[in-house]
Each structure stands twice: as structure tokens, then as C-alpha cells.
Amino acid sequence: MKKLIFALLAAFTVPALADRLPLPADTPASYRDECGSCHLAYPPALLSAGEWKRLLAGLSDHFGSDAAVDATQQREIAAFLTRHAGNPGAAGNPPRITRTARFVRKHDEIPARFWRDPRVRSPANCEACHTRAGEGRFSEHEIGIAELRE
Ligand code: HEC
Ligand code: HEC
């Protein structure tokens, strides 16, 4: 009986992985500060280890920006991202989260005009729609653009 209760409890306390992507507890300050200064400090699980390595190899020419960090920070960030990386699937060099099959699948019902909306500007601008993205919350019920809310 004890075992059964435990199993039931475990089943109901497992977080809904799909819309909860909080930064892991061991996220280094360098990642939050350096990789969260121009855009969201993206959840590491959204690219694979190889894709993160490819991205980190080109930080001085990062989507038209210079995002270079010093060698110590780069090692720390690389180790962290590799540790928590997800499955491969991103196109482009540097690779984009917004070109992964997972991202496309999760967003395929959004009418094209919203990606160019002045409130959004870019699919990479997660927080424009996911108002609580900074806390790792991506629920369809926490969308800042009224027309996209259900
Ligand atoms: C100086 C500003 C700046 C810094 C610092 C910066 N980035 Fe970026 N990053 C950008 C810009 C600009 C883009 C392209 C955004 C767009 O297309 O709207 C981008 C895009 C990305 C993307 C792709 C988003 C997508 O479209 O899927 C990833 C992943 C990324 N950055 C990771 C990082 C990481 C990791 C770091 C820290 C090592 C970092 N960035 C630091 C400016 C920056
Ligand atoms: C134009 C607004 C918009 C932008 C920008 C946007 N999203 Fe979304 N996203 C949505 C909407 C709306 C949904 C809900 C779609 C649905 O359930 O039909 C969603 C769903 C999701 C989900 C799935 C949640 C679940 O319940 O399974 C994840 C994860 C997610 N987005 C991550 C991101 C990330 C990461 C970024 C930035 C790289 C981003 N989104 C950028 C609007 C946006």
C-alpha cells in the first residue's frame, strides 16, 4: 500500500516538462549575465551539445553581434550548456533554437504576421509572448499578446 501511494504521489508531482523549462540550479552567473544580456538566457535543453559548441565557437560574430566572453567564462558556459543540452535538431550556423523541429511544432498555429509584429520583432524574442519566460514558464496560458491567448 505504501508503495502504491508513493507511486501515485510521484505520478502527480512530476512537473509538466513541455511548458516548464527553468534554468537548472547549477546555472553559472556567467551564463545569466553574459548570455542573458541581449536576450533571454535560453534554456540549455533547447539545443544539443554539438549545437551549443558550434554556437560558442563563433561568439565574436554572433548573429551580427560581438558576444565574445573571456576564456574562463567560455569554458564554464560550455561545460554548463553541454551538461544540460537536449537532442539535436537545429538548422543554421550559428544554430537557432527557433529553427528546431520542436520549436516549429510548438508554434505552427501562430499566424505568420505575429512574428513580424512590432511587439515581437523576432521569434528569438521569447519574452515578447511568454511573459514569464525569465522564470522558465512557457505555458499557453501565460502569453502576453492578447490575440494569441486562448
Ligand atoms: C551583444 C548581444 C548578445 C549577447 C551578449 C549574446 N547574444 Fe545570443 N543573440 C544575439 C542576437 C542579436 C541574436 C539574434 C536574435 C534574432 O534573430 O532576433 C542572438 C541569437 C541567439 C540564439 C539563437 C536564437 C534563435 O533564433 O533561436 C542563441 C541560441 C543565442 N543567441 C545564444 C547566446 C549565448 C549562449 C550567449 C552567451 C555566450 C549569447 N547568445 C550572448 C545577441 C547576443
Ligand atoms: C509570437 C509569440 C511567441 C514567441 C515570440 C515565442 N512563442 Fe513560444 N509559444 C507561443 C504560443 C502562443 C504558444 C502556445 C501554442 C499552443 O499551445 O498552441 C507557445 C508555446 C511554446 C512552448 C510549448 C509550451 C507547452 O505547453 O508545451 C514552448 C516550450 C515555447 N513556446 C518556447 C518558446 C521559446 C523558447 C521562445 C523563444 C526562443 C518562444 N517560445 C517564442 C508564442 C510565442
Image: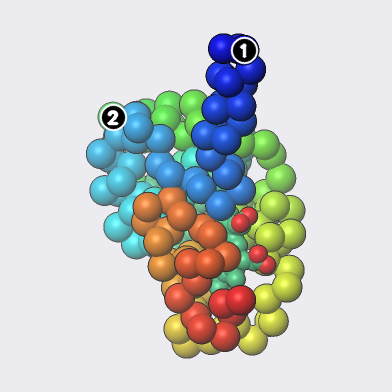
N-terminal of the pair, mark 2 or mark 1, is: 1
Q: Amino acid at mark 1?
A: Met
Q: Do callouts 2 and 1 mark residues in contact (Cβ within 8 Å)?
A: no
Where disc 2 sits, the SS reads helix
Q: Is residue 106 left or right of residue 142?
A: right
Quarter-wise, where is residue 10 in the image?
Answer: top right
Query: Where on the image, by quarter, is ligand 2?
Result: bottom right
Quadrant containing the N terminus in the rendered view: top right
Looking at the image, which is closer to me, 73 or 137?
137
Q: Residue tagged by mark 1?
A: 1
Image height of 68 relative to 4, above or below = below
Q: Which residue is painted at 57% across and 35% down in the image?
A: 12
Residue 92 got which mark? Answer: none
How far across and down, in percent of the image, does residue 148 sit?
59, 79
Left or right: where 30 falls relative to 106: left
Q: What residue lies at 55% left-to-right and 27% top-to-bottom?
A: 9
Distance between mark 2 and mark 1 Cα atoms: 52 Å
Residue 72 circle label:
2
Q: Residue furthest front?
A: 1
State the residue in front, 26 or 63: 26
Please name the residue shown 56% across and 19% down the image.
Answer: 6
- Measured as percent of width and height from the top left, residue 77 is found at 38, 35
The crowd level at tag 1 (other Cα within 10 Å; few <14, some 14-19, many 20+) is few
Which of discs 2 and 1 lies nearer the camera? The answer is 1
Q: Amino acid at mark 2?
A: Thr
Residue at 57% x, 77% y is 149
- Reply above or below: 101 against 131: above
Helix, strand or loop under label 1: loop
